[in-house]
């Protein structure tokens, strides 16, 4: 495949047709995504949810990366350059190491909801903050996304932006990172062209 879709869990990606999308590119995702969809690669860096994923047996039949895999669980260790990354940026880095010409970032909202609250599709579920909680600090994610883009200058990164996607100046300055509206992305997908 020439395209990868890397899924953060920001609410801007709610409703995207993941089963349909996998016909057009490999999907990388993180954390609780596995509850509803099996991506090509799943990443979890927070110990409680990573341990839970291992306990379900998911890594025995699917590709799963974490920081400290349990022996014989089937899980893989995140490579050292990205070991300290958060889950979404680590998934992005793993995709980039596979040298896809284009990588889409979906659900990388890196900001609060429209009502200034915690922005995550899985808010209020096990291993996540409650709905209505204060937003999570995203400065480390911004830094890590920038690092990946700069490390792989020949890859065209495309951050898909919805209503809850924060505008971040540090990302605007990256020459190989483009921003694309969610509606434009869906139109491309529906026309099955220019993906």
Image: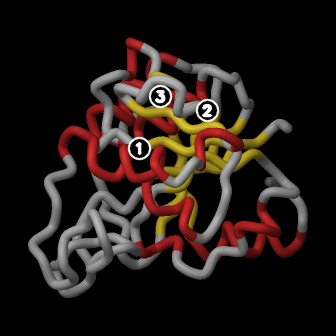
Disc nearer the start of the sequence (3/2): 2
Q: Read off the residue under disc 3.
A: 149
Residue 179 appears anywhere in the view: no
Q: Read off the residue under disc 2.
A: 95
Point 90% across, 65% down: residue: 192
**Mark 3 vs mark 1: in front:** 1
Q: Which mark is residue 44?
A: 1
Task: Give me the C-alpha separation between circle 1 and circle 2.
Answer: 15 Å
Residue 177 at x, y percent in the picture:
51, 39
**Mark 3 vs mark 2: in front:** 2
> Are discs 1 and 2 less than 8 Å apart at CB?
no
Query: Is residue 102 shown above or below 119?
Result: above
> Are discs 3 and 1 less than 8 Å apart at CB?
no
Colour pattern of the rendering:
secondary structure
Determine whether the residue tagged by mark 3 lies in a helix, strand or loop: helix
**Mark 1 vs mark 2: in front:** 1
Asked whether 190 or 176 is in front, the reply is 190
Determine whether the residue tagged by mark 1 lies in a helix, strand or loop: loop
Q: Quadrant of the N terminus?
A: top right
Residue 42 at x, y percent in the picture:
56, 45
Task: Give me the C-alpha separation between circle 3 and circle 2.
Answer: 11 Å
Disc nearer the start of the sequence (3/1): 1
């Amino acid at each position: 495949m020439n395209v990868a879709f890397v899924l953060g869990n920001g609410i801007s990606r709610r409703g995207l047709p993941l089963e349909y999308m996998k016909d057009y590119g490999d999907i990388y995702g993180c954390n609780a995504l596995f509850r509803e969809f099996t991506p090509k690669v799943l990443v979890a860096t927070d110990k409680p949810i990573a341990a839970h994923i291992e306990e379900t047996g998911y890594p025995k039949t699917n590709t799963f990366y974490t920081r400290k895999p349990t022996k014989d669980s089937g899980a893989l260790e995140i490579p050292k350059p990205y070991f300290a990354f958060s889950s979404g940026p680590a998934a992005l880095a793993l995709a980039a190491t596979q040298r896809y010409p284009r990588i889409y970032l979906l659900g990388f909202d890196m900001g609060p909801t429209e009502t200034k609250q915690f922005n995550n599709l899985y808010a209020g579920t096990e291993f996540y903050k409650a709905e209505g909680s204060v937003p999570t600090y995203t400065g480390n994610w911004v830094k890590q996304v920038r690092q990946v883009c700069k490390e792989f200058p020949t890859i065209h990164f495309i951050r898909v932006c919805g209503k809850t996607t924060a505008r971040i100046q540090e990302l605007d300055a990256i020459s190989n990172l483009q921003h694309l509206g969610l509606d434009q992305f869906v139109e491309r997908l529906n026309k099955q062209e220019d993906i």
